[in-house]
Image (cartoon, helix red, strand yellow):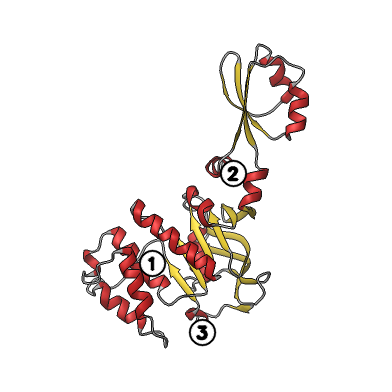
Amino acid sequence: MSKTEAILEIKKLKKYYGDIRGVEDINMKIKEGEVYGFIGPNGSGKSTTIKTIMSLINATSGNVYINGKELDKNDLEIKKVIGYLPSEIKLYDDLTAKEILDFHESFYDKNLSKRRKDLVNLLKLDESKNIEELSLGNLKKLGIVLALMHEPKILILDEPTSGLDPIIQNIFYELLLEEKKKGTTILYSTHILSEVSKICDRIGFIKDGVIIKEDNIKNIEENSMTYLTIESDEVDKIKKELNMKIIAETDNLVKFINTLKPNELLEILSKYKISKLLVEEVSIEDLFIEYYK
């Protein structure tokens, strides 16, 4: 498959639970080898979208395609190329981690023992413990091994780092970067925004069941607004002429959300006596807050 083609595509996906909206109109194309950050607060529709892709729930309307083929929940060949890490991991409590991994390994024709062992050692997972004895972090580590051990072509990750300590989080990011180098396609759902700039190529912001903005991370960071702070005895005149949204203000100092290009801004400000001038980049976190007001 050409890397310009979509390996995972969602068209006009809608899911309602009775009268309650899950997602309203999701359209998404993820190319082969791309890491797509699916960003939004809790309740925005991320998990509903993912559960639909995984055939855990049925869509009200719309379609999901893998490799250009419409998703069929009974198609075992499609399932073999997908690795899935849910936000909440629910397994058989009376089995050990080893028994769960053995069971999972039995689904595949190829030998997974080396990959499994490498992941278990890397994440420091104790296979001897029963599922009911595992902490949230260790349960998530087991979920990571289950998602990755069969070397899937597509990884679907729903809030993957919740419960992991910072050291294991960094190991997990390194694992994903290795997967990215191998050409694995990754859908990465999160509301923790510091994660997306580490591994994602492109971001889709979801709000109220609809993707409200989608772009590659470089464009989002370069073309987004900036914060502009000005200190001047003529601050009232500057405020009137700029007519931009003010987010903080004291006597002679004001902080704006700036949407002007540098040349336009300098042309306006050159008419005034300015004591201090500061232009700051807006972080992904700041953009998130702005989109979801």
Q: CA distance from mark 1 to mark 2?
A: 31 Å
Q: Secondary structure at mark 3?
A: helix
Front-most of 83 and 59? Answer: 83
Which amino acid type is marked by label 3? Glu
Q: Position of residue 224 (x, y in %)?
A: 65, 42
Q: In the rendered image, which residue does mark 3 sit on?
A: 77
Q: Secondary structure at mark 1?
A: helix
Q: Secondary structure at mark 2?
A: helix
Residue at (71% x, 19% y) in the render: 238
Residue at (78% x, 25% y) in the render: 267
Which amino acid type is marked by label 1? Ile
Residue at (42% x, 71% y) in the render: 148
**Mark whose residue sits in front, 2 or 3:** 3
Task: Check the image and name the residue furthest to the bottom.
Answer: 109
Q: In the rendered image, which residue does mark 1 sit on?
A: 144
Asked whether, in this view, residue 188 is left or right of residue 254, the answer is left
Is 218 situated above or below 81?
Answer: above
Q: Position of residue 271 (x, y in %)?
A: 77, 17
* Whether residue 49 can be seen here: no
Q: Quadrant of the N terminus?
A: bottom right
Count of marks placed on residues: 3
Q: In the rendered image, which residue does mark 2 sit on?
A: 291
Q: CA distance from mark 2 to mark 3?
A: 39 Å
